Image: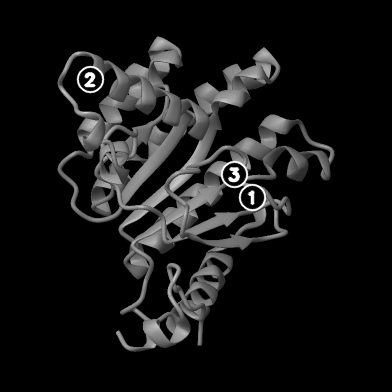
Amino acid sequence: MSLKEHIDNTRVPRHVAVIMDGNGRWAKSRGLERTEGHVKGVETVRKITEIASQIGVGYLTLYTFSTENWNRPKEEVDALMNLIVVAIERETPDLIKNNVRLTMIGDIERMPDFARQRLTRCMNDTAHCTGLTLVLALSYSSKWEILEAVRKIAAEAQAGELKISDINDTCIDNHLSTRGIPDPDLLIRTGGDLRISNFLLWQIAYSELYFSHKFWPDFSQDDFCEAIIEFQNRERRFGKTSEQVSKH
């Protein structure tokens, strides 16, 4: 029996977020250029998107490129941008075939024109799909996102469009780049590091965290299923007691 068959289909997390870490270290450990790790990582994206769709995950958010990644060597940044665009364009027909909708979050305006325009075209091509929503976090960081939300809220308050008493959790949710996307139930990080790295800090307040020692290029569909199974074996209390949770 495969790990996929051990998953309780009635308790699949609606939203899984992934910090795809370890591409560069995977390549380095094999004496390859870092870009080779990113190329291999794209194959893993395809496999994990496929299994997530098969088991009924509603949203899969992948930390694809952070605002801090702009500080990497220009050659690596350029190669990454081109790789992301080419990979998504190549996969778009299969995304449509599998009813997967593509969307993006982040400081998209900071991206090169060619990348932004071509990725937007892929988003438009999959806009009619109603299955899994694949969310690419590109030029994204949580501190940037929260800062932008604060600025928008402050501007609306200053213009008299928003009262101070109206500012609550829902108000902030509606000003984030993830507006309309449910908070992650499960956050997976590969690569062995035990940190969040400025990713969805507001949204993961009550997410379950799962850390894998495997580098992203080695993370398999079975590894993903194992994370889902562990998630299903945890008790999510959201601040309540076990006794309170068991009553529902």
Please determine whether, in this image, residue 9 is positioned above or below residue 208.
below
Percent from the top left, x then y, of residue 213? 72, 59
Mark 1: amino acid: Pro
> Mark 3 to mark 2: distance in Å?
41 Å
> Mark 1 to mark 3: distance in Å?
5 Å
Mark 2: amino acid: Glu
**Residue at label 3?**
41
On the rendered structure, is 217 left or right of 132? right
Question: Of the residues under marks 3 and 2, which one precedes in the sequence?
Answer: 3
Question: Of the residues under marks 1 and 3, which one precedes in the sequence?
Answer: 3
Mark sitting on residue 208: none
Viewer-nearest of labels 3 and 2?
Answer: 2
Are there few (<14), some (14-19), or many (20+) residues within 10 Å of tag 2? few
Residues under numbered marks 3 and 2 in contact, where contact means CB atoms less than 8 Å apart: no
Question: Of the residues under marks 1 and 2, which one precedes in the sequence?
Answer: 2
- Work out whether residue 96 can be spotted: yes
**Residue at label 2?**
156
> Mark 1: which secondary structure?
helix
Mark 3: amino acid: Gly
Residues under numbered marks 1 and 3 in contact, where contact means CB atoms less than 8 Å apart: yes
Viewer-nearest of labels 1 and 2?
Answer: 2
Percent from the top left, x then y, of residue 58? 30, 58
Percent from the top left, x then y, of residue 199? 53, 41
Q: Quadrant of the C terminus?
A: bottom left
**Residue at label 1?**
217
Quadrant in the rendering for residue 79? top right
Taking the view exactly as shown, the residue that stands out farthest to the front is 165
